[in-house]
Image (spheres, helix red, strand yellow):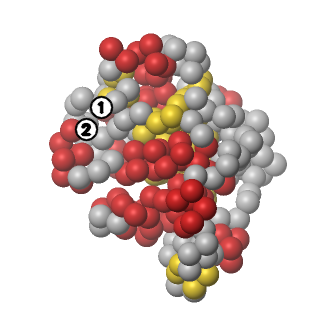
């Protein structure tokens, strides 16, 4: 993807002294080059689901057996130190400002992604959004859109009903739990037509949530959906 010129605040941020969020060394990056090399090493991944996979095949065994509805997935790193702690701080401890450096890392990791027309966050149900005060996926998506020179919308893909925490459920239950969890705002459906969507979230686990959201977007007319996440559980 050709990188658009960086927005001015981004250019300024890159020149200001700043402390690495992981090793605490001072430099000009919130994630220093040393920590990125150590904790987000480039590695072979399945092109469909981003699972670590020797030889970077077009699709891993699981994706060959049952191709996901999204076309490709991109991640910064496997879910583990330090990304698990950073995501917990970002998501549960109110450190929303971590969105900017995390989005920067993700834009870098997805530099070979097809250019999206629209960045959409995986939505939170209204009650969870009210509890947390912000949707971490939207905080990432709107910054990614600025970095990639496309639009971001939080009012297209909706999650009207509360579903049980996916982590509490077995795989088969996860799929049933998510059925009809998402919908597209009927008045804004036309905005999806023939668009390539980057669906943004913090973590990709079984892919059940991303798959259900992607299915909903494709059924509403989107041309293709890719998934962009900070961390991939292996
Ligand atoms: Zn560091
Ligand atoms: Zn795969």
Figure check: 18 above or below 139: below
Q: Residues within 10 Å of mark 2 (few under 14, many from 20)?
A: some
- SS for dot 2: loop
- SS for dot 1: loop
Residue 105 in view: yes
Closest to the observer, 69 or 9: 9
Figure check: 118 above or below 217: below
Q: How far across and how far down the image is residue 65, in percent? A: 64, 28
At a point 61% along the width and 32% down the height, the residue shown is 116
- Disc 2 to disc 1: CB gap under 8 Å: yes
Left/right placement of residue 125 relative to residue 207 reads: left
Figure check: 198 above or below 185: below
Identify the residue under disc 2. Answer: 125
Q: How far across and how far down the image is residue 57, in percent? A: 78, 41
Quadrant in the picture for the N terminus: top right
Which circle marks residue 42 in the picture? none
Residue farthest toward the bottom in the current orientation of the protein: 25
Left/right placement of residue 89 relative to residue 13 reads: left
At a point 53% along the width and 55% down the height, the residue shown is 103
- Quadrant of res 209: top left
Q: How far across and how far down the image is residue 93, in percent? A: 30, 67
Closest to the observer, 92 or 165: 92
At a point 18% along the width and 52% down the height, the residue shown is 131
Residue 22 in view: no
Identify the residue under disc 1. Answer: 159
Mark positioned earlier in the residue sequence (2 or 1): 2
Q: Residues within 10 Å of mark 1 (few under 14, many from 20)?
A: some
């Amino acid at each position: 993807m050709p990188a658009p010129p960086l927005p001015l605040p981004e250019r300024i941020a890159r020149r200001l002294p700043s402390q690495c969020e992981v090793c605490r060394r001072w430099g000009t990056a919130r994630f220093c080059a040393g920590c990125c090399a150590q904790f987000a090493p480039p590695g072979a991944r399945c092109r469909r689901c981003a699972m670590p996979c020797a030889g970077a095949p077009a699709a891993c065994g699981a994706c060959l057996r049952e191709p996901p509805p999204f076309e490709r997935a991109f991640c910064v790193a496997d879910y583990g130190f330090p990304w698990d702690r950073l995501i917990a701080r970002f998501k549960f401890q109110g450190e929303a400002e971590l969105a900017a450096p995390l989005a920067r890392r993700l834009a870098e990791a997805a530099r070979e992604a097809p250019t999206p027309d629209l960045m959409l966050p995986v939505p939170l149900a209204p009650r969870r959004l009210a509890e947390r005060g912000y949707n971490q996926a939207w905080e990432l998506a709107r910054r990614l859109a600025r970095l990639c020179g496309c639009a971001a919308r939080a009012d297209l893909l909706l999650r009207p009903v509360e579903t049980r925490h996916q982590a509490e459920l077995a795989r088969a239950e996860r799929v049933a739990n998510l059925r009809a969890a998402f919908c597209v705002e009927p008045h804004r459906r036309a905005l999806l037509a023939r668009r390539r969507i980057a669906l943004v979230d913090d973590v990709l686990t079984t892919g059940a949530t991303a798959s259900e959201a992607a299915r909903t977007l494709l059924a509403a007319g989107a041309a293709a959906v890719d998934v962009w996440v900070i961390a991939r559980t292996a």
